[in-house]
Image (cartoon, rainbow, N blue to C red):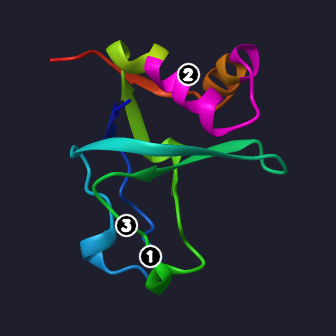
Amino acid sequence: MSVRVICIDEKNKPSIIPASKWVKEQELYHILMVFYSIPSKTMAYTLEEIDLDQSCEPYGVFHAKRFAIHQDDLEEFMQLAKDCTELNDIEIKELIEQEEFEIIENE
């Protein structure tokens, strides 16, 4: 399973994270895992291309709002989110709407 996302927001990089481990706008990435924070009701990802290791602590994931999801990958994203979290399809759809996920058409 490989869900493609494009970075749409590279701003506000924490100073502890080196530039080599930070996302770049308009770059293509692939989601490894989806995380859901119950208190903040937000999603975050780990990416295949960037390992936020112990040197980046306390940061270990990228906020989902930094990325747009390819339209053709939406179903795969929903399955990955379901596999990685305790959320069901309805909750995931609601989160996508609440978070105002940006969807991009494949080129």
SS label for mark 1? loop
Residue that lies at the very extreme toward the left in this rendered image: 107
**Residue 2 visible somewhere in the drawing:** yes
Q: Residue at x 41, y 79 (%)?
A: 17
SS label for mark 3? loop
The location of residue 81, given as percent across then percent down, is 59, 31
Q: Is residue 83 magenta?
A: yes
Residue 92 located left or right of residue 27: right
The answer to whether the residue labelled 1 contacts the one labelled 3, judged by CB atoms less than 8 Å apart, is yes
The residue indicated by pointer 3 is 51
Q: Is residue 82 magenta?
A: yes
Q: Is residue 47 above or below residue 104?
A: below
The residue indicated by pointer 1 is 53
Q: Amino acid at mark 2?
A: Met
Mark 3 to mark 2 CA distance (whole Å): 23 Å
Q: Residue at x 33, y 13 (%)?
A: 72
Q: Amino acid at mark 3?
A: Asp
The residue indicated by pointer 2 is 78
Q: Which residues are magenta?
A: 76-91
Displayed quadrant of residue 3: top left
Residue 79 located left or right of residue 106: right
Q: Residues within 10 Å of mark 2 (few under 14, many from 20)?
A: many
SS label for mark 2? helix
Mark closer to the chain start, 3 or 2 = 3
